[in-house]
Image: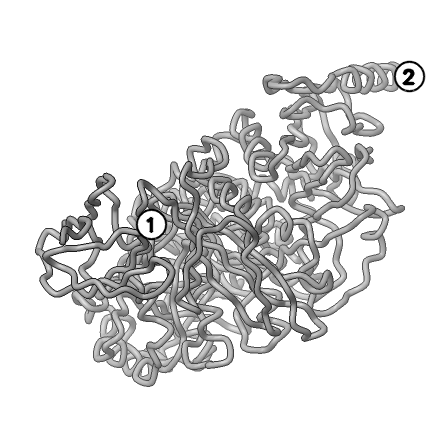
Amino acid sequence: MKNIILSVLCITCLLSCKEQSGAKKQNSSFDVFPETLNLSALNKNGVITVSKQELTPDSTGVIAEIPLDFPEYNRGIYYRPFSKKLAAGNRVEPLWFNDIAELDGYKHQKPRMDSHINLGAFMMLQKANGDYLALLPLVSNRIGNTFSIHNNKAFLTVATYGAASENVAVPLISYGQSNNPYEAAKMAWEGAMKIDNVKENINWRSQKEYPEAYNYLGWCSWEHYKHKIDENNMLSALNGLKESAIPFRWMLIDDGYLDHKNGALLSFGVDKKKFPNGWEPITSQKDEKIKWMGIWRNFNGYFGAVSPEHNMPSLSEHLAARNPSGKRTILTPKISEASANAFFHEMTKNTKDNGFDIIKVDFQSDNFRNNEGASNAILGVHHNNIALEENCKDKDLMLLNCIAQQNFNVFNHRHSALIRGSVDYKTTKDRLDVTFVQNFANSFWLGHTHWLDQDMFYANFEETAQLMAVARAMSGGPIYLSDVPEHIDDAVLKPLTYRDGRILGTLAPAVPLPESLMQDPYFDGKAFRVIAPLKNQTAAIMAVNLNQDDKEVYTQVSLKDYAFAGGMIQPYVGLWQTPKEGVLLYDYYNKTVQVLKDDYSFTLASRKERLLLLNPIKKGWAVIGRPDKYLSAATFNLLEVEENKIKIKMVENGDLLLWTNGKTPHSENFEFTAQQDGLWFGKLTTPKADKNYTISTKVD
């Protein structure tokens, strides 16, 4: 009875918290788990917690399942792993709903890939008043929270997936409310950054070090070779990369080399039949062209974890026998900091000692299942992720987190800046659609703490090569291929990089514009539009037709879209203000410009895209940049703007596009030719070593 009374009092307190303009973040703390979490009268942002107490999981490892009572809303987006078991963590994707009951008993509908609905990692509602409410289930060292759906309602599932009792406080949900969705999500993460046993394990994207190699174009063995790799074909691929005119700078050897027995790891070494001389013949060939080399690792050892027949004596005391499938015994690190550190030290030492600089660690999200029923599976994930990160940091290995979107892993990435955004790339239509949507929709909630990796792609698959290239340019993350190196068509690649392979990049990950964020891009009959900020206050917008009926769609870009380029920039200072003199729209594919006043409308055929750049107009000038690059505004720095001249510094010398309001540009270094509608093409005739150029109005 006492617990029931306390619960009612706490709920009453939560309901009494009125939303106030400019209200400061306020935590809502319960003494016991509430019978319902009423989310209708929350402050602008805050964290909901339960006080420290003795907690005993049930036979499934669940501590509590709390119904959620939502405010009135018009639309929602729910992020769930679409697979319960295999590789659940790179399969987190959004589902859209008008009523949460629609998700109960969700039926698989292509191009989505499964009907699994639980282990939800994030949710956002667009309330009846138009504001957005972002809800982030929190994961601490010992407690993992996720959303689940049943009985036509949403629940917060609080669990350890283990058997041991815990005497801890429990952070449940962090939330944020705003009239723009990016700020709402940012507020939710901001709350998480202030809670003990959570804040120590996460960090803002901008506070992490982006791995140097991923600033350059790379190559990965997986999609072309799959498991059929050996010393000969990897040496052949390496030679092809070195001889290619394409500026590849790194090479990643993926799965297919490990020393294992029936899918269980024997050691972190190689299959001697495939690689009889180990890694030395390959990694010894690093040079200025292929400066970095990487290797794939499985977070759990291998698909069957570690074999009882392993030959790593230093790990024997640190491995525990588990039988998660009920079919065979596997070994996995004991749930302790020391054992996790020993395991990942062995993995990373082998990686570093063999000459690798990059480590791609896969299947992280399968880890908690290996320890289900042990003392505390969430604590095991915590120890393992932290040990991986610390060992990579200590050994200067550049970490790419793969199959890691499950929030049990995401909340333990305090150093690493990169995370996979979607399932593997394939050339089929359904997979193209799913990966495109996953990558950009996931950047909305994951992009606050990570840059997203969109996976390798084929430059030679003409049907979608340019779409895939532009998508990766917009992402701001890594770009790498898997074609046979000596036969790659570089037509879609040249606009991505400079001559040394450096990727032009964005200031923040691209995210869906608000309208696209809350629409189903497969069935709503509209284009899916994403936006990214570039240097020089330029916004890049990409629109794609992914509708399943294969019909043409009509869409547009509006002046109001420009503001949302500021949504993901860190530190966040608000949405962008429209420049006083307006914005110039440059259509990259059509090579046309117009001052954006009314909507810029166009149609898109099925699986076709358009790239638009919104450039600020200043004192009658708008500099577009190098016309041979997708993200042209990233190719220069605007140093000075006056009525009669501008000064720029180019990142790399090249031709220039600019627009003037009735001015005739002149330069000692560029030969300008009038195009149309005030657009000028500047042919670089006299390059300068310092790449600093002055362009003035012509004096007759």
Residue at 28% over, 64% down: 674
Q: Kindly identify the residue that appears in the image at 70 percent across and 57 percent down.
A: 520
Q: What residue sits right under mark 1 in the picture? A: 661
**Kind of residue sitting beneath label 2:** Met
Q: Dot 1 lies on which element?
A: loop
Q: Position of residue 108 (x, y in %)?
A: 77, 65
- Viewer-side residue, 427 vs 381: 427
Determine whether label 2 and label 1 are within 8 Å by CB.
Answer: no
- Residue shown at the point (21%, 54%) measured from the top left: 665
In-front residue for pair 12/500: 500
Apparent side of residue 564 relative to residue 26 in the rendered image (left or right): left
Gap in Å between the C-alphas at discs 2 and 1? Answer: 76 Å
Tell me the element at label 2.
loop
- Give the answer, above or below, for where 573 lies relative to 519: above
Quarter of the image that includes the N terminus? top right
Rendered position, 578 above or below 614: above
Question: Which residue does the numbered mark 2 point to in the structure image?
Answer: 1
Residue 173 x/y as whole percent: 67, 32
Q: Pick the quarter of the image with the C terminus.
A: bottom left
Question: In the rendered structure, which amino acid carries the disc numbered 1?
Answer: Asn
**How crowded is the residue under tag 1: few (<14 C-alpha within 10 Å), some, or many (20+)?**
some
**Vertical arrangement, residue 54 with respect to residue 65, above or below:** above
Callout 2 crowding tier (Cα within 10 Å): few <14, some 14–19, many ≥20 = few
Q: Give the quarter of the image for residue 496.
A: bottom left
Q: Quadrant of residue 11?
A: top right
